């Protein structure tokens, strides 16, 4: 399966990037998911094949090179809503990495771990689509203070448009592209990925039109299902 488009997750270590991907792709949450060894998932979306990239732990150990975002059609910038510094890092450290992304690249901003602060995030968005491993009443606590609010995310989104020299009128609305999720309960995880996947298709068609070279050729990998985890190490 050859990917038509690349979607990357960016953000500080521990914000929950691997957990979000794992929740969406594997339909579950594990307290200890290892990023090391992981690289990307393949996801069929309509007539298109998407590669969805995790950082393979490099944000912690070696930093991420310019390769990581090269040709990306969408970037999902992730922070932890209980850690203000993780939001600051998105602007200070991670935004510059998107210089190599596609010119029409779509941006989403995601505040994860909302189960720690918001009672409404105890339940996954759609009942029955997720099986929670533990009874929710015992697995969550709302004693943690929310350090980043939706307004902060919306302000960052606007800064990104400026940084990328994109006209706000032509870009998706900030309110639409800022999400609060919980990989732990599954809250809004499907909504996040499916919104991004739907919106990334026109970007991919535009890339094809402009003759963007493919960033990875996965013809050598066999796929049996519509998603597959591919290890690059
Ligand atoms: N409470 C809570 N913990 C989470 C959530 N997502 C991830 N975690 C935890 O945060 C830690 C870091 O998650 P991980 O996915 O490895 O983050 P990454 O470094 O960004 O890939 C792990 O201990 C996870 O169990 C969430 O939505 N809620
Ligand atoms: Mg990780």
Image (cartoon, rainbow, N blue to C red):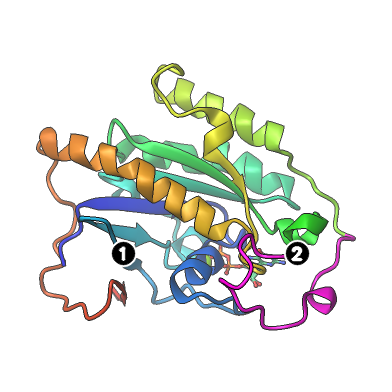
Q: Give the structural element (helix, strand or loop) at label 2.
A: helix
> Which residue is identified by label 1?
43
Q: Position of residue 225 (x, y in %)?
A: 27, 78
Q: Is residue 60 above or below residue 99?
A: below
Residue 226 visible here = yes
Residue sitting nearer the eye, 216 or 209? 209
**Above or below, 33 relative to 69:** below
Disc sitting over residue 122 in the figure: 2
| Spatial separation of the CA atoms under disc 2 and disc 1 | 27 Å
- Queried on whether the Cβ of the residue with tag 2 lies below 8 angstroms from ligand 1, the answer reads no
In the rendered structure, does residue 130 fall within the stretch colored magenta? yes
SS majority, magenta: loop
Q: Of residues 15 and 6, which is closer to you in this image?
A: 6
Q: Which sits earlier in the primary sequence, circle 2 or circle 1?
A: 1
Q: Quadrant of residue 90?
A: top right
Magenta stretch? 123-143
How far across and how far down the image is residue 157, in percent? 54, 31
Quarter residue 39 falls in: bottom left
Q: Badge 2: how crowded within 10 Å, few (<14), some, or many (20+)?
A: many
Placement of the N terminus among the 4 image quadrants: bottom left
């Amino acid at each position: 399966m050859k990917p038509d488009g690349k979607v990357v997750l960016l953000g500080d270590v521990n914000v929950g990037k691997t957990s979000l991907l794992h929740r969406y792709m594997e339909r579950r949450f594990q307290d200890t998911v290892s990023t090391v060894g992981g690289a990307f998932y393949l996801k069929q979306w309509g007539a298109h094949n998407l590669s969805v990239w995790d950082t393979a732990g490099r944000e912690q150990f070696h930093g991420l090179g310019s390769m990581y975002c090269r040709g990306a059609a969408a970037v999902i910038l992730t922070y932890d809503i209980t850690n203000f510094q993780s939001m600051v890092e998105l602007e200070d450290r991670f935004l510059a990495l998107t210089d190599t992304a596609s010119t029409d690249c779509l941006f989403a901003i995601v505040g994860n771990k909302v189960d720690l602060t918001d009672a409404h995030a105890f339940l996954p968005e759609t009942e029955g689509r997720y099986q929670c491993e533990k009874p929710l009443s015992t697995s969550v606590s709302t004693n943690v203070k929310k350090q980043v609010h939706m307004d902060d995310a919306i302000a960052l989104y606007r800064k990104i448009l400026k940084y990328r020299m994109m006209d706000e009128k032509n870009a998706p609305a900030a309110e639409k592209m800022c999400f609060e999720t919980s990989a732990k309960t599954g809250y809004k995880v499907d909504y996040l990925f499916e919104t991004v996947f739907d919106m990334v298709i026109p970007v991919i068609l535009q890339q094809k039109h402009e003759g963007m070279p493919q960033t990875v050729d996965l013809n050598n990998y066999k796929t049996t299902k519509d998603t597959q985890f591919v290890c690059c190490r």
